[in-house]
Amino acid sequence: MMGFTGLRRRGALRACCAIAALSVGCGAVQASAQDVPANPPSADQTAPDQDTTNDIVVTAQKRAERLQDVPIAITVITPAVLDSTNARNFAELQGAVPGVYFAGNSGGGRTYITLRGATGLALNTGDEPVAIYMDDIYLARGVTIGMSDLVDIGSVEIVRGPQGTLQGRNATAGAILLRSADPTSDFRAKVSASVAWPEEFRAQASISGPLGGGFEARLSGGYTTEKGWAYNPYTKAHIGGSESAQGRLVVTKEAGAFSARIVADYAWTENFPAIFRYAKTNFSPLPTGALVPAGTATPNTPLDPATRDAIFNHNRISLNPGTDTVVKGGGISAKFEYAFGGVDLISVSGYRKAHVDGINDSDGLDVARMGYNHNDDRSNQFSQEIRLQSSGKSRFSWILGAYLFDENQNYVDDIYNLRLSLPTNTVTRYAGKQYTRSYAAFADATFNITDQFSVIGGIRYTEDTKRLVSTIRATNLDTNVSTVTPYSPPQAKWTDTSYRAKLVYKPSRDLMFFAGYGKGFRAGGYNPFAVQVPYAPETNKSFEIGSKGELLDGALSFSLAAYRNKYSNLQLRAGVPTGGAIITNAAEALIKGVELEMTARPADGTRLTGNVAYTDAKFTSFPTARNTLDQPVDASGNTLPRTPKWQFFVSAEQDFAIGSSFLLTAEANYRWRDRIYFFFTDQNSQPWQDPPGDELGARLTLKPIDERWSFSVFGTNLTNSRIINTAAVTFSYPQVGLNKPRVIGVSTGFKF
C-alpha cells in the first residue's frame, strides 16, 4: 500500500492526464420541453424560461412523459438545482429530496443512501434497496459513486417507493435514475471552474455538436481536488477531502425509424474521509494492551470533553493510519430503438467495471495501528434488456420486456486486529469470488378508461442465483500460525413475482390523484465475513396515495404522497466485534410517511421551493437482534437507522435586473433534519445518535441576459453547525463523520 503522499501524487498525475485528454464539464440549465419528445431533451436543448414543473420530462416508466402525468412520487434534480443548492454530489443534496437521507463519506469508497427508512448496506457483496441506474444501466456497485461529482448530468430522477415492475432490480425502496446530458444539434461548448475555502478546486467543461451523417456527440469531464477540512496531527495531513477526475462521451444517431445512443464513461476518485470513533475507548492494564474483554467494552460511553472539543470545534481528528481509498469505475451503455409504426423495439446493453482499493482506519484511534483493514475489491457486470412497447398516445399502452444481469466479483479484505479486541496480534484475510446471475420478465400496461380515469398494472418475475467460493485465513502474527477455513456454500437461488396496480384520476391536464399497491424484492446473499447460511431475501409491500398538480396558471405546483411500507426480512448491516461487517435480517418493519413538495412563483423573478417529510419507521418484530456487543436483544419497537422522523428544506430565489444587460440572482436555502440513530439497538446511548441539525446556504450570481457567462459567490453551512452525516459500526463501536464546516467560494462559467 502506497503512503498518502504517493497516492495523492499518483492521483494528481492521472487527473492531469485526464484533463489533457478530455474537454470537461457541466452547468446547464434545467431540462424541460413543452411537448413530450420521443427522447428526453438534454439540459442544453431547452430554453431557460421553460422551467415549470409542467415542462419536466421523466422516464421512470420506461417512456418519456411529463412529470405531471406520472403517478409516482418523483423528484427531479437538474443542473439548475445543483447550482442553486451548491451541491455537486449526493451527499451535498441532503435535504433537497423529501424522504431521502444521503450520507457522507463512510470510508471504503462507499456511501449509504436511506430512502423512506430503508438503508443501504455499503458492503462489497451486498445488494442495495435503492437501485441506481446510469443511462438505463443498473449499477450493482452504485454506492461507489455516492461521493463523486455529478459531472455533465442532464437530470437525476429520484423515484420513491418500490419499483418492482419496471426498475425491478432490487429496488425495494426506490430508484435513482441518472441521465447524461445529450449531444446538441448545433456546436456548443462550455467551461466552468470554482474555488472555495477550505482549499477546494473544481473544473468542468464540455463540447457538443453534430458529426455529420445523422451523428451527434458530446465529450465532457471534470476534475476536483479538496484538501480536506480536518487536520490529522498524527500523520500531519489534512483529511476529509478527495481528488477525482471523470470523463464521458455520448454519441447519438438518428436515421428515420432507427435511433441509437451510446455512452462511455470513466471515473477515478481518491477519498480520505475524516471519520472517527465516537465513543470513549478503555484499554486493558494488561501488558497486551488490548481492549478490555467483550462485555465490558465501552461503545456506549461518550467521548471525553477534550477529544470532542478538538473534533467538533477545532477540526482536529487524530488517526493512525487513517483512511485512504481509490475508487475506479466506468463502462459503456448502448441503447438502440426501432419504430415499427405504433410499436417500438428497444434494446439496452451495458457493461461496467468497478475497483475499490485502499486502507480503512476501522478503529478510529491514533494510539497505534490496532484495528484497520486493507480492501481490494473488483467487479464487472453485464446486463441486457429487450423491450417491445407501444408508442404514441393511445387508450391502451403497454410494455413487454426481458432482462438479464450477470456480475462477477473478486474481493480480498485483510482485517488487522492488533490487540484491539483480542489479546493477540491477528490478521484475517477474507478472499473470494461471488457470481451473480439474474433473469427477469416483465409486463406493464395503462388503460385509459375515460379521459379522466386510468388503470395501471404491472408484473415482474425474477430469478436470482448467487454462488460464493472463498477462504478465510486467520494468522496469529505473534506465532506466525495460520488457520484456513474454506467457505464455499451451496449455490443459492431465489425467485419472486413483484407487481403494481394503480388507479389514476385526472380531473384536468394539470391536476392528478392516484392510489396504488405494489411489491418490491431484494435478493438474499452471503456474508463474506462470516461462515453462516445465506441471509434471506427482502420484500416490501407498499400502499400509496398521492396527488400532484399546478394551480394559479402554473404559479404554484405541488406533489403530495402518503405511504405505508411493510418490510419482511429487512436486510440490515451489523458490525462484528473482531472486525468486519455482516448482513442480518430483521423480521418485520413498518414504515409510514407523508411527503410534500411545493414550488411557487408569486411574482416575476421570484421562485420559492420547499419540501417536508414525516417518516415513522419502526421494527414491528425483531426479537433476534444482537446489540453492539453481539449480545441477543429484542429490538422490536426501535427506530430504523438513519431515518429522521421530520425533515424539511426551503429555498428562495430572486432576480434583479441591472440595467437592460445584466441579471443578478440572489438565492438562499435552509435544511433541517430530526434526530437520527446509527444502529438498530443501543438507541438510548448518546454515541449511537445525533440530535437535530440544520444548515444554511446562499448564492449570488451575476450574468448577462444571454447567459454566455456567469459569476457566482456562494456559501454553504454559513452558521458552521456540526452534524454527524455518516455512521457505521466497526469493532462494535460507532465510527462517524461530520458535515463540512462553513465553505465560502466563487465560481465562473462560460458558454460558447
Image (cartoon, rainbow, N blue to C red):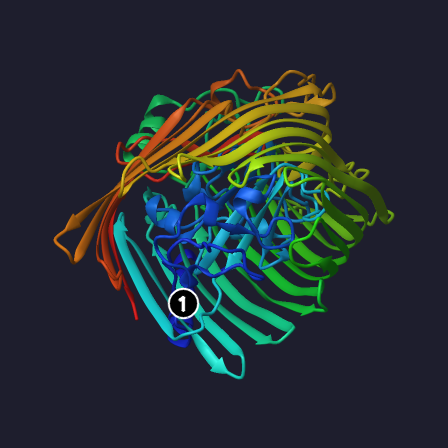
Q: Residue furthest front?
A: 450
User: How many numbered discs sit on the rendered protein?
Assistant: 1
Residue at horizontal 76 percent and vertical 39 percent from the top: 499
Position of residue 469 measured from the top left corner of the image (x, y, whole percent): 79, 53
Position of residue 47 measured from the top left corner of the image (x, y, whole percent): 37, 58
Q: Would you say 255 lies left or right of 705 here?
A: right
Q: Is residue 580 above or below residue 676?
A: below
Q: Is residue 590 above or below residue 475?
A: above
Q: Is residue 220 above or below residue 102?
A: below
Q: Nearer the viewer, residue 218 or 271?
A: 218
Q: Is residue 647 above or below residue 554?
A: above
Where residue 505 sits, quadrant-wise, is top right
Q: Nearer the viewer, residue 354 or 45?
A: 45
- Disc 1 crowd rating (10 Å Cα; few below 14, some 14-19, many 20+) is many
Amino acid carrying mark 1 in the image: Ala
Q: Nearer the viewer, residue 531 or 297?
A: 531
Q: Would you say 47 lies left or right of 708 here?
A: right
Residue at horizontal 23 percent and vertical 58 percent from the top: 705
Position of residue 445 measured from the top left corner of the image (x, y, whole percent): 74, 47
From where the camera sits, is residue 359 visible? Answer: no
Q: Residue furthest left?
A: 659
Q: Nearer the viewer, residue 567 or 664?
A: 664
